[in-house]
Image: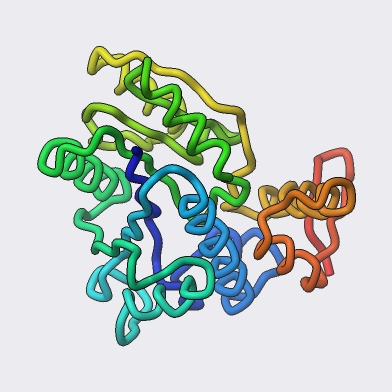
Amino acid sequence: MTTVAVLCDPPRPGQVLDELVETSPLSEAEAAELYEALLKDTVAAVEKSGGELLVNYRADDDLDVPGEDSEAEIRAVIEDVVDVEEARFEVQVGETFAGRVGNTATHLLETEEVSSVGITRPEAAFLARTEIDEGAMKLRSTDAVVAPSPGGRVYYAAFGEPIDFTDCYAPPAFETVVDRCLDAGLDVEFEQQKTYVEAGADLADALTLVRTQRKATGIVPRHFAEWAAETDLVVDADDEGLSLTR
């Protein structure tokens, strides 16, 4: 069984998806609503998989936007998709994202001696049970599994042994993570590329995908699809690619 850590923040306006706010028509409040939908879909995907969910949240002292209780806010968001009384919650430790990933993964692998650790974030909008379970199957014969996103990013990574996590998500994260695995003498396999929602262009691509897939197959991340159906954002296309307007 893979323990899958979802590294997340409480969905406070101004705290989450800041690059998306800067590069799209979304307000901070709208971005926070989107983050809630993405967080629900991500933890639901882990819950439906054969993995064990770990909600790895940022403590209030580490956040830019003040609030009363980070863990309580996240519990309130996801209580309708997972059993929050049974789910495991732990605070993140570390000054950088890579440092927090490293502390979580290393502790689980070395101290708790779990068989493997998966790492993801709510921005992995299309992460599904399939990727988690396929990754777990691959980890029976390999040491690490890495799933790429456009722009050299990573939406999911799973490790059977620790690597040097220092700055391991430095761009291009996909190459950096794989190089660290190889430097540690680990074998690496890959999963299919999927969209990662971080900037306006990412959201334009994700909206196109989820709206089209919902019409054609109905197989979509539920809460993101519902958010996409309600938003008034329009995806435009020109010679430079996709963009968002109202």
**Front-most of residues 35 and 41:** 41
- Quarter holding the C terminus is bottom right
At a point 22% along the width and 38% down the height, the residue shown is: 114
Point out residue 142 in the picture as x, y percentages from the top left corner.
36, 17
Asked if residue 181 is positioned above or below residue 63 in the image, the reply reads above
Residue 99 vs residue 242: left or right?
Answer: left
Point out residue 101 in the picture as x, y percentages from the top left corner.
29, 45
At a point 63% along the width and 37% down the height, the residue shown is: 194
Asked if residue 9 is positioned above or below residue 30 in the image, the reply reads above
Point out residue 64 in the picture as x, y percentages from the top left corner.
34, 73
At a point 60% along the width and 74% down the height, the residue shown is: 33
At a point 32% along the width and 20% down the height, the residue shown is: 143
Point out residue 163 in the picture as x, y percentages from the top left corner.
23, 28
**Does the image show residue 14?**
no
**Front-most of residues 43 and 82:** 82
**Front-most of residues 176 and 195:** 195
